[in-house]
Image (tube, coloured by chain):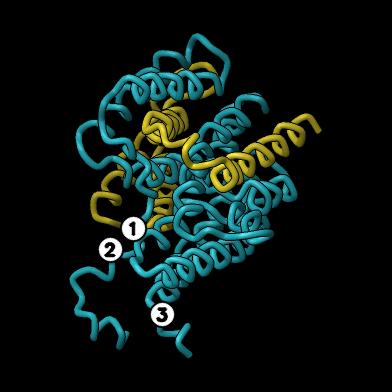
Chain colours: A yellow, B cyan
Amino acid sequence: MNLWFWLLLACILAYAWKVMGYLVPAKLLEDPRMSRVAGTMTIGLLASLTIVNTVASGQALAADARLGALAAAAVALAFRAPFLLVVIIGAATAALLRLIGWN
Amino acid sequence: MKICVSPAVRVGISISIATGLYGISFGALSVTSGLDFWQTMALSLLLFSGGSQFAFIGVVAGGGSGIAAMSAATLLGMRNGIYGMQLNALLQPRGWRRYVAAQVTIDESTATSTGQADPAEQRRGFWTAGIGIYVLWNLFTAVGALAGSGLGDPKQWGLDGAAVAAFLALLWPRLKGFEPAAIAVACALATVLAVPFVPAGVPILIAALVAAVIGWFSHGRSDEGLEPDVDPYQEHQGHGGTREADS
């Protein structure tokens, strides 16, 4: 139930950000610094989430089949593959690498 | 019938289908991360912002706490506030429409709307993409969650590799130019260095702080990384207007 609490709070805060954009007078939020921080934070968080899901296993670092998935996904993206195909390629690569013995 | 030939509506529908479909991957990854069916659906119905939803389950899957998952999702949702400001200026929704518009203010609906020049088209594009994605994203989240719970060992299917690919695919379109790439590398490095020393989930928040500090002190473009992660109009470039109308 604890997870439910944080999950619902995340939902409320997500909606709060969205509504704020519509309700707060634009002048108050015109500071270009605000939108720059929102932008760099988006990049930073997604980069961090990518790498955490690739090399972290709990508090340890590990080099396993997920590295192969990252490389395959990068190649697919370089060839402009659509999102769903990239995800499937990532999964298939990790599964195949495990099948041939690389954990 | 005018609505049917509206370019904004056409783009809105195609982006709805493309985005809605990858709700399958969110649903499947969410249940294999340890969330149950209704927690997964609550994220798609109530939180409704792809990046934040993936962030929430990504932290949980890595063994992070609920508060770390909530923090990562919330920080990632900040950009929707900026989109809201832009759309409020463009569309000026009034009354209850404002509160509905807010919920469907995401990367894709913003991109569809701001890609149009005519105010009526901007409005049609926003609502078509927003409502269309909301309906399909939730539908396919449910499909993915039901399918995912029958998969057994997620690692055997490479679902941890799928999560890696999903995050990279969300990041990729934002890496236009040197500065965004440098920010991504710096934050990835900060994350790897932090992993052994702090509880799971916290390295992501450290990376967010690094990114925020860079954004605060840098003098780059004010919309760095804020171009929505999709370009709904890219497939229409290079085609003649008449050929496009035929297809």
Q: Nearer the viewer, mark 3 or mark 2?
A: 3
Q: Chain of mark 2?
A: B
Placement of A71 over or under B238, stated as above or below: above
- Circle 1 packing at 10 Å, graded few (<14), some (14-19), many (20+), is some
Q: Is residue B86 left or right of residue B99?
A: left
Image coords of residue B185 (percent x, y): 30, 26
Q: Residue at x 64, y 58 (%)?
A: B100
Residue B245 in view here: yes
Q: Are marks 1 and 3 in contact (CB under 8 Å)?
A: no
Res B167 quadrant in image: top left
Tell which of B43 and B241 is nearer to you.
B241
Say if labels 2 and 1 share a chain. Answer: yes
> From this viewpoint, which residue is outermost toward the bottom?
B1
The structure residue drawn at horizontal position 49% and vertical position 46%, both measured from the top left corner, is B85
Which of the numbered marks, if any, corresponds to residue B234? Answer: 2
Q: Nearer the viewer, residue B207 or B221?
A: B221
**Which amino acid lies under the numbered mark 1 shown in the image of this protein?**
Asp
Residue B4: x percent and y percent? 46, 84
At 36% from the left and 59% from the top, the residue drawn is: A82
Mark 1 → mark 3, Cα distance in angstroms: 18 Å
**Residue A84 vertical position relative to residue A47 in the rendered view, above or below:** below
> Of marks 1 and 3, which one's residue comes earlier in the chain?
3
Q: Look at the picture and state if B38 lies above or below B14.
A: above
